[in-house]
Amino acid sequence: MQDHLIHRLKEQDRTAVGELYDAYGSALFGVVLRIVQSRELAEQVLQDTFVKAWRNGASYDPAKGRLFTWLLNIARNTAIDATRTAHFQHYKKTDSLDHLVHKPGGEAINPEHVGVREVVSRLDEKYKSLIDLVYFKGYTQEEVAEETGIPLGTVKTRLRYAIQELRKLFGENVAAVALLAAVILNK
């Protein structure tokens, strides 16, 4: 069944894209949404993903990996490209109150407003650059390793050490450090 679908995709059969969407759309949407953090943008990225898959179907090689993995890479790269656009950067700066973090007292805070950048700027450059990529630019730890050429284990160790240093620098603002740690360690 999948071989037939792959053949139809390579032949640019438009109905094959619909079947791909039915089979993989929801799984890919979850991945894309995690990257772009906007339902509206995730829907656009998902649509772009399937258009790219249809246009580049001839480039899929089953010997190099499963169809889902190929689609996942297209979706992930499209989502990352979307986060680097001027529109996305503007959207992040004017994000709605729904995306703010809430303190126990109910008062909403945005990490940008608790001096995160200022405190991170006090870190040693080897930690600061990693925090910048992971926290402020949304890279995963694996992407940071690729981007910087630093082994993944070293990236993870440096991020853990950076969080320890941030705990010292933030002092009593445990909520800000917890927020940073959650974002950084879950990437």
Image (tube, rainbow, N blue to C red):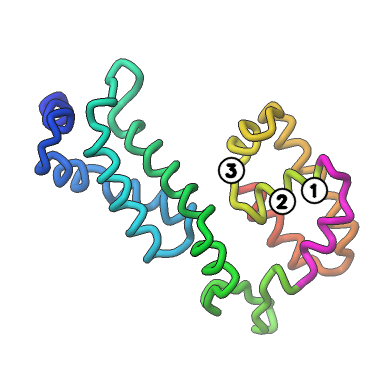
> Residue 145 lies in what quarter of the image?
top right
The span shown in magenta is: 114-126
Question: Would residue 77 be counted in the magenta stretch?
Answer: no
Q: Residue at x 85, y 44 (%)?
A: 125
Classify residue 13 as left or right of residue 52.
Answer: left
Q: Residue at x 27, y 38 (%)?
A: 53
Distance between mark 1 and mark 2 Cα atoms? 6 Å
Classify residue 142 as left or right of residue 168.
Answer: left
Q: Nearer the viewer, mark 3 or mark 2?
A: 2
> Between 90 and 171, which is closer to the camera in this rendering?
90
Q: Nearer the viewer, mark 3 or mark 1?
A: 1
Classify residue 137 as left or right of residue 161.
Answer: left
Q: Residue at x 44, y 64 (%)?
A: 38
The residue beneath circle 2 is 132
The amino acid type, in three-letter code, at marker 2 is Asp
Dots 3 and 2: beta carbons under 8 Å?
no
Give the mark nearer the N terminus: 3 vs 1: 1
The residue beneath circle 1 is 128
Q: Main secondary structure of the magenta part?
A: helix
The residue beneath circle 3 is 140
Question: Would residue 121 be counted in the magenta stretch?
Answer: yes
Distance between mark 3 and mark 2 Cα atoms? 11 Å
Dots 1 and 2: beta carbons under 8 Å?
yes
Q: Secondary structure at mark 2?
A: helix
In the rendered image, residue 25, in percent from the top left (x then y), is placed at: 27, 48
The amino acid type, in three-letter code, at marker 3 is Thr
Q: Secondary structure at mark 3?
A: loop
In the rendered image, residue 28, in percent from the top left (x then y), is placed at: 34, 47
